[in-house]
Amino acid sequence: TKHKIAVIAGDGIGQEVIPEGLRAVDAAAKKFGIEIEYTHFDWAHCGYYAEHGKMMPDDWFDQLKGFEAIFFGAVGWPATVPDHVSLRGSLLKFRRDFDLYVNLRPVRLMPGVPCPLAGRKPGDIDFYVVRENTEGEYSSIGGRMYEGTDREIVIQESVFTRHGVDRILKFAYDLAQSRPKKHLTSATKSNGIAITMPYWDERVEAMGKQYGDVKTDKYHIDILTAHFVLNPQRFDVVVAPNLFGDILSDLGPACAGTIGIAPSANLNPDRKLPSLFEPVHGSAPDIAGKNIANPVATIWSGAMMLDFLGNGNPKYKQAHDAILAAIEKVLVEGPKTPDLGGSGDTTSVGKAIAAAI
Ligand code: NAI
Ligand code: MG
């Protein structure tokens, strides 16, 4: 079967890194006999907004819903369109309407990448952050009273549903069970947030009973952030509700080096709607158009996409691993982009990785 992938490069360096992502995915797909059909969409970028007064056509959902995955660059060009308009008008709609309830970010110290934490070497840091991406603290339930007066009151509710909590925990436990360490860490704050967080802890405990071979522990979010920096070797799979996950999923990749290499997946594991794969970084207007953006984050995201498309098929896992091995080789041997202290460019790094695959 041919996999159907929607490609949206978006703004700024999205346009430069996506071709390199496709180059690597193509090389790995060819090597392992995987067939992919790409459809490119020239919207969800700020140029489209300038012309049409919106980020996407009205039928965007119908145009995209039949794809298995969306390969996404970045969106945002603050000089012409405010960020909340560009982001809410595109990426956030995908996350919400495609019910992409898992935000998955690998945190791995790669060879050849200077680690901001002293004394760490590749192998010391290798874990995943699994963020709940649809509920929790990011609700729009609440309001203001007595606005503008001394009695002003502002309230915003958190929403934790059994369905929403259990599905993210199941995903995280399945992931932990598939890894050698079989270790799940839950981010909580049940000592201070007295209603929702004890509920989260309860559901973790209940789900953990179904995964007897997975070791579970939990940390309150404050000390957990300290452990990310001081003891990153402690972690294997870290699962967190939306707000804590948002923080950890930026902190984790930052602990393992530059934003230019950090990948992410926004998953709907039910597979009835497309999942989305994108670098963690944005459109980087400060370096856009110069062909110096690091393409590794996007190439790695492409590897995650292949793994997801395989849904357990070992051939796809091998394709993923082949891309990762090629990334590691080129991170050590070069060429490297300027963010890693090199003088290579986007295209030369992309081509070197494709050749190594
Ligand atoms: P950014 O991630 O675009 O850039 C932050 C810094 O990292 C910049 O100095 C940039 O040059 C550098 N950088 C980023 N990616 C790089 C790469 N691949 N290689 C080398 N250096 C890289 O974040 P910023 O500047 O806060 O936002 C710029 C625009 O991107 C805004 O419009 C923002 O809304 C949007 N954005 C979009 C995201 C998405 O599409 N998922 C995520 C984050 C920001
Ligand atoms: Mg964030």
Image (tube, rainbow, N blue to C red):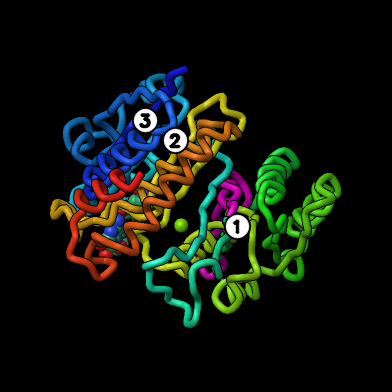
Residue 29 located within the stretch drawn in magenta: no
Mark before the other along the chain sequence, 3 or 2:
3
Q: Amino acid at mark 3?
A: Lys
Most extreme residue toward the left, as rendered?
290
349 relative to 94 in the view: left or right: left
The Cα–Cα distance between marks 1 and 2, rounded to whole angstroms, is: 27 Å
- The yes-or-no answer for disc 2 within 8 Å of ligand 1 is no
Q: Nearer the viewer, mark 1 or mark 3?
A: 3
Name the residue rendered at 65%, 75% in the picture.
223
**Range of magenta residues:** 129-151
Name the chief secondary structure element in magenta: loop
Secondary element type, mark 1: strand
Q: Quadrant of residue 165?
A: top right
The circle drawn on residue 51 is none
Question: Which residue carries the number 3 mark?
Answer: 30
Residue 207: percent from left, percent from top:
80, 47
Q: Are marks 1 and 3 in contact (CB under 8 Å)?
A: no
Q: Nearer the viewer, residue 189 or 8?
A: 8
Q: Quadrant of residue 202?
A: bottom right
The circle drawn on residue 94 is 2
In the displayed structure, would residue 227 be above or below residue 317? Answer: below
Quick one: label 3, few (<14), some, or many (20+) residues within 10 Å? few
Q: Are marks 1 and 2 in contact (CB under 8 Å)?
A: no
Question: Which residue carries the number 1 mark?
Answer: 155
In the displayed structure, would residue 121 be above or below residue 145? Answer: below
Quick one: label 1, few (<14), some, or many (20+) residues within 10 Å? few
Name the residue rendered at 33%, 41% in the picture.
24
In the displayed structure, would residue 322 be above or below residue 296? Answer: above
Name the residue rendered at 36%, 22% in the picture.
37
Residue 137 located within the stretch drawn in magenta: yes
